[in-house]
Image (cartoon, helix red, strand yellow):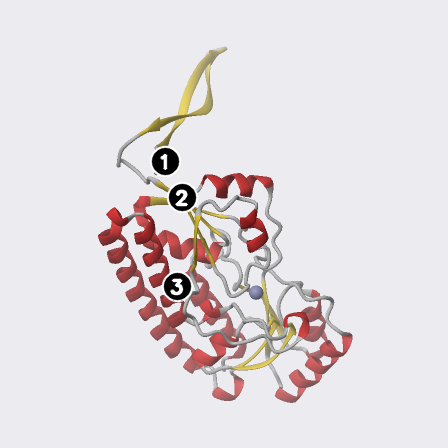
């Protein structure tokens, strides 16, 4: 395991100038061996699983997300800096189920370093039923909280493989977080009851709610893209969705933050449905968005569904 690098931040240079103080901040890094701070550097491919890894790793690791929040993890193009970061990391957690279409090619460039874990291992996938990726697994399984719990167990197993000395800490952190997720799952089941059953209809940008709809008793009315990197959707699809929305008297449509907005804007304009455009699926929200962790993201989305579809 690599030596711990501890950054000693804020070397302050104070200069006196015409009776006032000017403070210049710098930083200095020195290698230190020991257990005073995190001694693992980990990479997660995107912000949602970065949060899950942080919850389990706790103080024993620093975890970086390759795909910055707000960007689409399906079609991300890794940078040379990403390659350096991954090559230097102790371990990489990725989603799998073909979520990261760029991942295998990217990891080949690292020369087989470092160790890699798929957090979705063991999830029984639903499939994408049309478009360029027909027959591929639908990767958005974390939208069912009980499946995200499986991710947490996989992350815990990966961390114990990598750092057996932390086994008790990882298991304790994972168990505590799993209890929090069980409460989240219960909360969602209760909260969605406020939406009349006939209104539990989702029209979204990407077909990323199959697992959510199955778990929490919604119906997918329609979507623009089977999965985000699809080519331009046919104009006919927008026209069909306008018809479906009118027939269902749909009060709101929902756009994910990482997906092209215009087709849903058009549907909302033509049908008079409310456009709710701050739904988080493939990325957490920025700090202050109320969706900057997995738990907050799920709660935020459900609140938006209740606001749009509720009585
Ligand atoms: Zn997606």
Q: Is residue 70 visible?
A: no
| Residue at 36% in and 27% down | 31
Does label 2 or label 1 sit earlier along the sequence? 1
x and y, in percent, of residue 117 in the image: 42, 56
Q: Which element carries disc 3, helix, strand or loop?
A: helix
Q: 138 or 287, which lies in front? A: 138
How far, Cα to Cα, is label 3 from label 2? 19 Å
How far, Cα to Cα, is label 2 from label 1? 8 Å
CB contact under 8 Å: marks 3 and 2: no
For label 3, the residue is 151
Please identify the residue farthest to the left as the structure is shown: 168
| Residue at 26% in and 57% down | 171
For label 2, the residue is 90
Q: 265 or 32, which lies in front? A: 32
Residue 216 in the figure: left or right of residue 228: left
Q: 259 or 56, which lies in front? A: 56
CB contact under 8 Å: marks 1 and 3: no
Please identify the residue farthest to the right as the structure is shown: 235
Does label 3 or label 2 sit earlier along the sequence? 2
């Amino acid at each position: 395991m690599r030596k711990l690098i501890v950054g000693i931040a804020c070397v302050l240079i104070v200069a006196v100038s015409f009776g006032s103080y000017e403070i210049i901040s710098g930083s200095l890094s020195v290698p230190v061996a020991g257990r005073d701070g995190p001694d693992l550097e980990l990479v997660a491919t995107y912000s949602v699983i970065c949060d899950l890894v942080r919850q389990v790793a706790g103080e024993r690791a620093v975890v970086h997300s390759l795909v910055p929040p707000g960007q689409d993890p399906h079609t991300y193009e890794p940078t040379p800096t990403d390659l350096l970061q991954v090559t230097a990391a102790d371990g990489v957690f990725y989603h799998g189920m073909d979520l990261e279409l760029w991942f295998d090619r990217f990891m080949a460039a690292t020369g087989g370093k470092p160790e890699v874990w798929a957090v979705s291992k063991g999830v029984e996938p639903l499939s994408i039923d049309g478009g360029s990726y027909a027959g591929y697994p639908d990767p958005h399984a974390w939208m069912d909280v009980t499946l995200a719990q499986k991710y947490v167990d996989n992350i815990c197993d990966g961390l114990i493989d990598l750092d057996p000395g932390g086994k008790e800490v990882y298991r304790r952190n994972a168990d505590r977080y799993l209890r929090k997720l069980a409460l989240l799952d219960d909360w969602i089941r209760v909260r969605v009851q406020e939406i009349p059953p006939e209104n539990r209809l989702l029209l979204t940008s990407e077909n990323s709610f199959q697992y959510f709809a199955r778990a929490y008793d919604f119906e997918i009315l329609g979507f623009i893209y089977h999965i985000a990197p699809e080519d331009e959707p046919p104009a006919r699809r927008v026209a069909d969705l306008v018809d479906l929305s009118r027939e269902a008297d749909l009060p709101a449509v929902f756009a994910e933050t990482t997906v092209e907005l215009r087709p849903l804007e058009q549907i909302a304009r033509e049908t008079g449905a409310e456009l709710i455009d701050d739904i988080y699926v493939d990325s957490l929200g920025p700090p202050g968005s109320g969706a900057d962790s997995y738990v907050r993201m799920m709660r935020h989305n459900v609140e938006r569904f209740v606001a749009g579809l509720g009585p």
